[in-house]
């Protein structure tokens, strides 16, 4: 029987996996970097006070909501004018020492790399950071009205990410980078493919190119409809698209692009991550998907961007269903 790590790699490389990868089982997240310790990404749980993140925006997680999102009221908005972004936006310092990184190094060393892969986490990405700082609607308008300023802001964020990536690779020595950036809704991408490539292709080629030069596998989280962006994802160097929703027609994407990129998702949280979900409902979203996507270049997984569910029992129920489909498909 292959280890979780081996089975994951056999799956995404079109080799000989002996079962379906169960969601995130092959990834051991190491989250306690000095940056995250200094600037939490979001409140620990719904209802906790909003947290101020390193770039100055505040993330709030209200009760009853599935996740956190920045506060964009006048008292909390970071950048009210994209043409003046240099006045408002200040990248957080990354002057961390080896001593600062020591707890992260120890956490990474504690992982059995024969069994799983040490996984670093970065969020938000370039697109999200733009609208976190500027608010969603103004950010969408900025692409049309002030493209030069948007390019400059993206370049500024990119340089910061590259500095952070260097420290992550130097100290943590990850096997995987798990990078968040949502690019659409359940029905559409936020911007056109041409605009997406114009603003984000080269910056992500730089970021993901650096990780790949350091021997790091790239998993990009993006839980939405983004099928038109798959060729761009390949050009960026993404190895696995995590969070791909069922609306993307995953069997067709696996068939068309599977030798160039793998797909991790297909089980929509909006359908299964609820307090009263039944195993039969999870089977409805999982079983035929596994049959149609097959053994290679596909990892059945909820579309949520980390290894848990909003309602704790759901994650294990999905694992149970994947085990069932492994027995059916792999024998």
Image: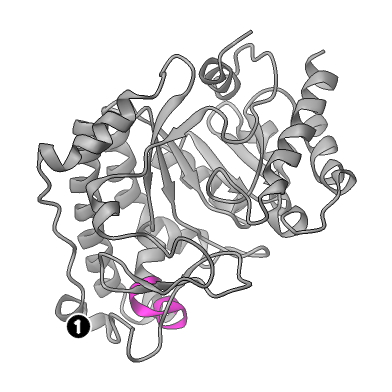
Q: Residues within 10 Å of mark 1 (few under 14, many from 20)?
A: few
Indicate yes or no whether the magenta region holds residue 232: no
Q: Which residue is the extreme one toward the right?
A: 280
Rendered image quadrant of residue 110: top left
User: Residue 122 at x, y = what percent?
Assistant: 36, 49
Residue nearest the viewer, comparing 186 with 102: 102
Rendered image quadrant of residue 160: bottom left
Identity of the residue drawn at 45% across and 56% down: 181
Q: Is the residue 233 above or below the residue 171 in the image? A: below
Q: In the shown orientation, is residue 231 left or right of residue 208?
A: right
Q: Is the residue 89 above or below the residue 206 in the image? A: below
User: Residue 167 at x, y = what percent?
Assistant: 19, 40
Magenta region: 132-140
The majority secondary structure of the magenta stretch comes to helix
Identity of the residue drawn at 56% across and 14% down: 3
User: Residue 229 at x, y = what percent?
Assistant: 53, 51
Q: Which residue is the extreme one toward the bottom?
A: 74
Identity of the residue drawn at 54% across and 50% down: 305
Q: Classify the position of the N terminus by image quarter.
A: top right
Identity of the residue drawn at 63% across and 49% down: 303
User: Residue 280 at x, y = what percent?
Assistant: 90, 44
Q: Classify the position of the C terminus by image quarter.
A: top right
Q: Which residue is mark 1?
A: 84
Q: In the shown orientation, is residue 75 left or right of residue 83?
A: right
Q: How many marks?
A: 1
Rendered image quadrant of residue 109: top left
Residue nearest the viewer, comparing 277 with 151: 277
Q: Which residue is the extreme one toward the front?
A: 48
């Amino acid at each position: 029987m292959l280890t979780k790590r081996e089975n994951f790699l056999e799956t995404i490389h079109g080799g000989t996996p002996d079962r379906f990868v169960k969601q995130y089982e092959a990834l051991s997240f190491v989250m306690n970097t000095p940056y995250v310790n200094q600037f939490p990404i979001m409140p620990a749980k719904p209802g906790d006070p909003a947290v101020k993140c390193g770039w100055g925006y505040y993330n709030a997680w209200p009760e009853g909501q599935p996740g956190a999102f920045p506060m964009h009221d006048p008292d909390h908005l970071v950048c009210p004018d994209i043409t003046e972004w240099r006045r408002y936006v200040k990248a957080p310092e990354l002057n961390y020492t080896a001593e600062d990184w020591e707890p992260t190094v120890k956490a990474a060393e504690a992982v059995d790399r024969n069994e799983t892969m040490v996984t670093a986490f970065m969020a938000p990405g370039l697109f999200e950071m733009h609208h976190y700082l500027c608010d969603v609607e103004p950010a969408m308008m900025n692409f049309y009205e002030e493209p030069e300023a948007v390019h400059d802001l993206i370049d500024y964020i990119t340089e910061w990410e590259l500095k952070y990536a260097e420290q992550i690779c130097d100290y943590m020595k990850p096997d995987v980078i798990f990078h968040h950036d949502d690019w659409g809704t359940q029905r559409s991408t936020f911007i056109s493919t041409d605009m997406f490539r114009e603003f984000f292709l080269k910056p992500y080629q730089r970021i993901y190119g650096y990780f790949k030069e350091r021997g790091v596998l790239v998993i990009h989280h993006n839980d939405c409809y983004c099928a038109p962006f798959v060729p761009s994802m390949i050009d960026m160097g993404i190895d696995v698209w995590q969070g791909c929703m069922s609306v993307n027609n995953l069997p067709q994407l696996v068939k068309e692009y599977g030798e160039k990129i793998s797909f991790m998702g297909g089980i929509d949280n909006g359908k299964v991550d609820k307090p009263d979900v039944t195993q039969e409902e999870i089977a409805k979203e999982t079983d035929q998907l596994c049959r149609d996507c097959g053994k290679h270049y596909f990892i059945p997984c909820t579309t949520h961007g980390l290894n848990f569910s909003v309602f704790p029992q759901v994650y294990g129920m999905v694992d149970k269903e994947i085990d069932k489909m492994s027995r059916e498909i792999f024998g």
